[in-house]
Image: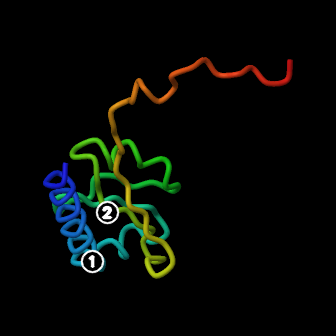
């Protein structure tokens, strides 16, 4: 699990660097828009951040996402979280409240 996390962290950092390398282009075309960058390319553009989440996470489960021109105020790290369900978590039936 640690190795996978390292890959995601390094990939996210590279996406962030790629975003800043193409920022002049982004400002010219997408000022005020939400943009997701992954592997050196723009993979999603939208007016609202929630509109690009599925696209931003589709390929590898992470991407650098920011609002072009408002970078000093906003940064969103997107990645899915998964874990195994612990069947021992609820060893007894839950109470029904309000009856």
Judging depth in this view, the residue of 87 and 36 nearest the camera is 87
Q: Secondary structure at mark 1?
A: helix
Residue 20 image label: 1
Please tell me which residue lies in front, 92 or 19.
92
Label 1 packing within 10 angstroms: few (<14), some (14-19), many (20+): some
Residue 30 position by quadrant: bottom left
Which residue is more in the foreground, 97 or 9? 97
Q: CA distance from mark 2 to mark 1?
A: 10 Å
Image coordinates of residue 50 in percent, x first then y, are 50, 49
Q: Which mark is residue 74?
A: none
Question: Is label 2 in a helix, a strand or a loop?
Answer: strand
Residue at 42 percent across and 49 percent down: it is 52
Look at mark 2 in the image and give the residue it sits on: 64
On the rendered structure, is 53 left or right of 32? left
Q: Relative to residue 51, is residue 21 drawn left or right?
A: left
- Label 2 packing within 10 angstroms: few (<14), some (14-19), many (20+): many
Q: Residue at x 51, y 56 (%)?
A: 47
Q: Nearer the viewer, mark 2 or mark 1?
A: 2
Label total for image: 2
Q: Looking at the image, which residue is at 18% across and 68% down? A: 14
Say which quarter of the image contains residue 18.
bottom left
Quarter that holds the C terminus: top right
Give the residue displayed 47% in from the left and 30% down from the top: 89
Q: Position of residue 61 (x, y in %)?
A: 27, 46
């Amino acid at each position: 699990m640690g190795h996978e996390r390292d890959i995601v962290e390094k990939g996210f950092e590279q996406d962030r660097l790629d975003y800043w390398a193409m920022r002049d282009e982004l400002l010219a075309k997408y000022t005020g828009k939400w943009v997701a960058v992954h592997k050196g390319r723009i993979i999603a553009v939208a007016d609202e951040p929630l509109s690009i989440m599925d696209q931003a996470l589709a390929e590898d489960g992470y991407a650098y996402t920011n609002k072009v021109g408002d970078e000093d105020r906003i940064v969103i790290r997107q990645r899915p979280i998964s874990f195994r369900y612990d069947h021992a978590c609820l060893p007894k039936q839950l109470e029904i409240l309000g009856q």
